């Protein structure tokens, strides 16, 4: 089931964390997004703080044509790129949780009307990713 949150779109998957990361990466690719960065939060917390943390990854997803349009309209928008997608192990219910940023929510930080159609297209593509995962 796809759920809207204040920051984005959330989907619960009844699959293990590793499978969820693979499914998310494949669904992003289908919508023209590549994963530029992958931050293993669990490993980082262990290394930097010596604390145990659940399986959790932050994927920096980029659709090059959309990024080009956004950066051309507003060079400072790079501060909000790429589109973050998180995947983490749902320790309470089992399975995994996927959250995708809502590009339109991020526009609240920027006063540039030229970005609205780019953000809308990015949101539509990310909604399709969420729908594919929920199917």
Image (tube, rainbow, N blue to C red):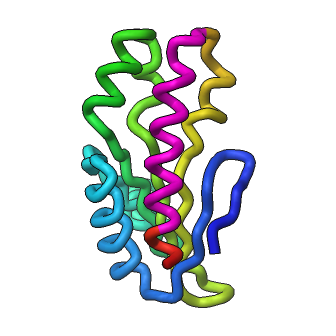
Q: Position of residue 48 (x, y in %)?
A: 42, 54
Q: Position of residue 42 (x, y in %)?
A: 44, 66
Q: How many marks?
A: 0
Depicted 116 relative to depicted 87: above or below = above
Which residue does the image show at 69% across and 64% down from the upper left? 3
Depicted 100 relative to depicted 89: above or below = above
Q: Position of residue 72 (x, y in %)?
A: 35, 11
Q: Nearer the viewer, residue 52 or 102?
A: 102
- Per the rendered image, the range of residues in magenta is 112-131
Which residue does the image show at 61% across and 56% down from the upper left? 9
| Quarter of the rendering occupied by the N terminus | bottom right
Depicted 134 relative to depicted 111: above or below = below
Q: Chief secondary structure of the magenta span?
A: helix
Q: Relative to 1, is 6 on the left or the right?
A: right
Q: Nearer the viewer, residue 106 or 46?
A: 106
Picture quadrant where residue 69 is located: top left
Residue 129 among those drawn in magenta: yes
**Residue farthest toward the right in the current orientation of the protein:** 6
Asked whether residue 35 appears in the rendered view, the answer is yes
Q: Position of residue 99 (x, y in %)?
A: 56, 59
Depicted 71 relative to depicted 59: above or below = above
């Amino acid at each position: 089931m796809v759920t809207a949150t204040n920051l984005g779109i959330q989907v619960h998957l009844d699959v293990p964390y590793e499978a969820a990361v693979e499914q998310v990466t494949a669904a992003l690719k289908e919508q023209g997004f590549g994963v530029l960065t992958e931050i293993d939060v669990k490993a980082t917390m262990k290394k930097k703080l010596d604390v145990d943390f659940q399986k959790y990854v932050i994927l920096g997803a980029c659709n090059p044509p959309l990024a080009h349009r956004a950066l051309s309209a507003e060079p400072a928008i790079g501060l909000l790129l790429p589109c973050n997608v998180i995947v983490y192990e749902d320790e309470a219910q089992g399975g995994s949780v996927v959250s995708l940023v809502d590009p339109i929510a991020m526009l609240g930080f920027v006063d540039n009307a030229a970005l609205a159609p780019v953000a809308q297209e990015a949101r539509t593509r990310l909604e399709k990713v969420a729908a594919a995962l929920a199917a």
